[in-house]
Amino acid sequence: MIQLFKNLFASKGNAVKDLSALRVDMHSHLAPGIDDGSKSAEESVALIKALRELGYEQFITTPHVMQDYYRNTPETIGNAVNQIKAKLKEEGLKIPLSFAAEYYSDENLTKLCAADNLLTFGNKMVLFELSYINEPVEIKSLIFDMKIKGYKPVLAHPERYTYYYNDFRKYEELFDFEVVFQLNLGSLIGAYSPMAKKIAEKLIERNMISLVGTDTHNLNHVRSFQRVLESKPLAKLIDSGRLMNQSLAV
Ligand SMILES: [Fe+2]
């Protein structure tokens, strides 16, 4: 019985009370109607309010840019974000909101990089994602090209790429290549798969995670984050002091 109380106490001590230590969410799909995230400015504001209740204060939203599905540009994204800003203003809410993009690693990304035309956040950081099916053959040269142009590549949710699961050295190679790893909050509660959770925890254990994002697409995502507060690896990650989320605040 004493041991049980001790265990209960220990788990409480290792949980976080809210997500205010992260302060800035730098990965979400809040811009209405331009990808698979929010469908209206009203929904976007509801998502922002729900994320604020969890402790977030500022948002850098990152709509998909994907040659085959979401041909977004700085203009389409800027216009959609302006709709949210207008709605926030109507409601008298002053919430810092800016945008970048989540670039899918396709030919379009290579072209935009060559043309110096990528949307960035923080210190020239570029959020990019990989195929879920195969490791892109050109990944190393893509990263190299981004670095040459002075961009800082940020790999979205490394824990979700199944083709790396059996070869952790692949993660180490990317990390040594100065790719910043951004973990998805949902991975810590097994939202994607038990294996993604395991890899997420291993990346935290190895001190390889520098950014955390919500990757919010809808209200169900945000509601599920309540359970993340119990995650001991998250508490460890926040305590590690290596997260850069706060430094993105304006
Ligand atoms: Fe995303």
Image (cartoon, rainbow, N blue to C red):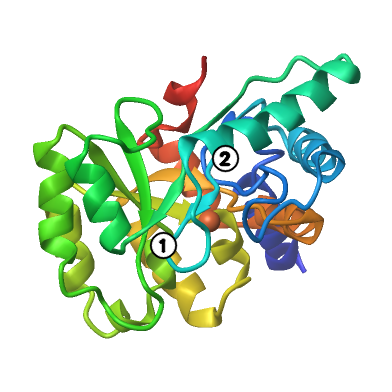
Q: Secondary structure at mark 2?
A: helix
Give the percent coordinates (x, y) of residue 233.
Answer: 50, 56
Q: What's the residue type where badge 2 is placed? A: Thr
Residue 206: percent from left, percent from top:
28, 57
In front: 237, or 56?
A: 56
Q: Is residue 25 among the parts visible in the rendering?
A: no
Which residue: 72% across, 45% down? 32
Report whether the residue tagged 1 is closer than 8 Å to ligand 1: no
Amino acid type of the residue tagged 1 in the rendering: Gln
Q: Residue at x 40, y 36 (%)?
A: 243
Q: Closer to the N terminus: mark 1 or mark 2? A: 1
**In the image, residue 196 above or below residue 227:** below
Left or right for 156, reference 189: left
What residue would you read off at disc 2? 76
**Residue at 9% over, 39% down:** 148
| Residue 100 place in picture, x, y as percent | 47, 36
Locate residue 204 relative to residue 176 in the image: left or right. right
Asked where in the image residue 43 lies, by quadrant, the reply is top right
Which of the 4 image quadrants contains residue 5?
bottom right
Cβ at disc 2 under 8 Å from ligand 1: no
Res. 153 mark = none
Residue at position x 47%, y 32% from top?
245
Q: Nearer the viewer, residue 162 or 241?
A: 162
Is there any visible trace of residue 28 in the rendered image?
yes
Q: With respect to residue 86, does 239 lie above or below?
A: below
The image's mark for residue 67 is 1
